[in-house]
Amino acid sequence: MKKLNRNTAVETTTYPTRILQFGEGNFLRAFTDWIVNKMNKEAGFNSGVDVVQPLANGMVDMLNAQDGLYHVYLKGIKDGQPIKEFSLIDCINQGINPYSEFDKYEQAIVNPDLRFVFSNTTEAGISWDETDTLDMEPQNSFPGKVAALLYKRFKAFNGDASKGLIFFACELIDRNGDILKQLVLRHAENWKLEEAFINWVNEACCFCSTLVDRIVPGFPREEIKEIQQELGYEDNLVVVGEYFHLWVIEAPEWVKKEFPAEKAGLEVKFVEDMTRFREQKVQVLNGCHTGSYAVSFLSGIETVREAYENLEVGAFMKELVYDEVLPGLEGSEKELKKFANKILERFANPFIRHQWQSIALNAMSKWETRNLPALMNFYHNYNILPQKIVFSLAAMIAYFKGNVQGECYKVMDDQWILDFYKKVWDECDGRPASVHQLVEKVLGLEKVWKMNLNEIPNLTLTVSHYLFLITQIGMKKAVNAVLHEDNPLMKMTVEGMKKKEEQSAEV
């Protein structure tokens, strides 16, 4: 079988590099690069991509071995009908490892044709690192890299306003583009860079906050041989995604004109304020994922579709969304339910095998971003805790134990979090008081939660109750218990919601 590269592939095009992309993982390749590929073919965008590996260990070598080529395999529902679609992506020109090829990285930075920067450096990627300095090759943090990148470009082109860059941040954090800009300017101040540079960043560059939506299970390991046989190429970077896609970009009108995605018929929406879109998507889709992964995995269910079709876990997922997340979101009940219906339908996609273990990556920061706001909204509205969301927190704590019924599994998160959980679980002897102490320590991690969750009335006690239940009877029975109409905690929640609604009606 032929190896996939530009010598063996037919009808590939090389485009001038106008995009620098930080991140070579499955999502960006199945989402932003797929979008650029469509724009090149159908809207004359004529833009190539240089991909920067954000960490020292990555996969740009694999990307370069295939001359930047790979296939995106979309599977889902289009116009009510099942569809499978392969696309050869040829917009990537090269992959760059700045840790071993800093000269090549510098050349990409001062490329006169460069106009856009895409990024997906995980939720933890847009963060402050005090140790970053201007002369590092490269800086540790992504904002540090961007600050140094822009300064080098500012110097290379003598502050030419036309050489400013447009940033599309794709990290799953609120106001991702705004936060990136704030940290870049903070580095500029910390490094004592000249005022003219700061003015250039503010006036010649645009940092766009964006919202991305496409389920990307990633590399189809189990069926790769059959797929390669169908393609006729040995493609080791095939990435599977659902057909549905949505990219909401908060940007001025002139940015929309420079990025003509609508001409290619793509679901790319330019808006003045993305707040409503973000809250709905993050809390419903991502929140359901993060709120259900531990419940599902510890119930012996490996994929999203299998969980959604399971009687108990599927009911848990639906009730979490419809009963506890939607009541805290802005918008009419009819519109919100329509949106939720569309989102949850995607979980039953017969073609997508979305592994819970991939969703479990960096679960602590995800829960803080996706589920904690829903918990706080519900508590603020009804003065009572949402039991499914609280149960999901207990389930996540159970997941971080790293074994179920004596069987170990790999947990992926920051090392300090893994070390923390190993310590607290080793210290827990299983008694209710010991479980309560463990929960207190977890909820007190202000580094993760940005607050002390123990201060939320009854949360520590309720999480401890559910965690003890999980450890005693197992996840399957515990899920059934939390769903059961005789659950006294659920009765309190329902009664609290009814009372609040009655009070609102009287007013």
Image: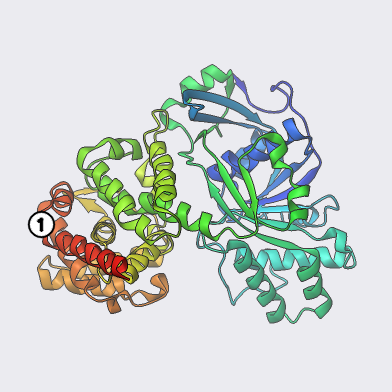
For the rendered model, the colour scheme is rainbow
Left or right of 285? Residue 436 is left
Q: Residue furthest front?
A: 506
Q: Is residue 410 visible?
A: no
Left or right of 405? Residue 271 is right
Please, what is the three-letter code of the amino acid marked with disc 1? Gln
Q: Nearer the viewer, residue 349 or 357?
A: 349
Left or right of 231? Residue 345 is left
Task: Name the residue beneath numbered marker 1.
Answer: 472
Name the image quarter holding the N terminus: top right
Q: Residue at x 28, y 35 (%)?
A: 309
Q: Position of residue 297 (x, y in %)?
A: 27, 46
Q: Residue at x 24, y 74 (%)?
A: 440
Is disc 1 placed on a helix, strand or loop? helix
Q: Residues within 10 Å of mark 1 (few under 14, many from 20)?
A: few
Q: Position of residue 362 (x, y in %)?
A: 41, 57
